Image: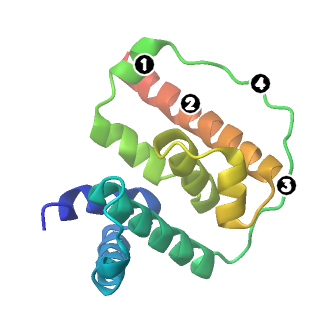
Amino acid sequence: MRYAGKMLTVCRRYARHEMEAEDLLQDAFIKVYSNIEKYKHKGSFEGWIRRIVINTALKNYQKHSFQKERIGLHDYEEDWLEPKAISNLGEEELLKLVSELPDGYRVVFNLYAIEGYSHKEIADMLEIGESTSRSQLVKARKLLQTKILGIQKILL
């Protein structure tokens, strides 16, 4: 199927390792095939499949999440990176850094920064507060900045 490669990339962003990503993809495509009659031909077929893949990944995350962080926003100063630090990283390197984030941070970062969901939508999907979604995103960004700065120092 022509969407398998794209959807495996989506699964990799939510999975902790490659085998988990492949399992997520398989589960998602079983759902796609089982529910193909529910596709209403409104919007793109790829978008419909992507939504199933993301929902499958989120259900897997919630099922395997041992504890949900219920914390509010803390006083974080966001230091912004020089654009050249990020531009020196390739897509694979950046995705690898995102994949190394703790589960909660990674899921919220993917949903917000990559998939484009709002904090309200993320809170509803993950059954957490909006402030928790915001906090997780701030912490994810801070951790990514630290990792990118570390890489930049090594390169210099």
- Residue picked out by circle 2: 145
Front residue (pair 77, 30): 30
**Which three-letter amino acid code belongs to the residue tagged 3?**
Ile
69 w.r.t. 144: above or below: below
Assign the C terminus to one quadrant of the image.
top left
Query: Which element is circle 3 on?
Result: loop
Sequence-wise first label, 4 or 3: 3
Q: CA distance from mark 2 to mark 4?
A: 12 Å
Dot 2: element:
helix
Which amino acid type is shown beneath numbered disc 4? Glu
Task: Estimate the x, y position of residue 8 in percent, counting from the top left.
Answer: 28, 62
Kind of residue at badge 1: Ala
Of labels 2 and 1, earlier in sequence is 1
Q: Is residue 95 left or right of residue 7?
A: right
At label 2, the amino acid type is Gln
On residue 85, the disc is 1
Residue sitting at x 74%, y 43%:
134
Q: Which residue is mark 3?
A: 71
x, y percent for residue 99: 44, 53
Mark 3 vs 1, N-terminal side: 3
Residue 89 vertical placement versus 135 (above, below): above
Judging by the rendered image, the residue that carries numbered circle 4 is 77
Q: Is residue 35 visible?
A: yes
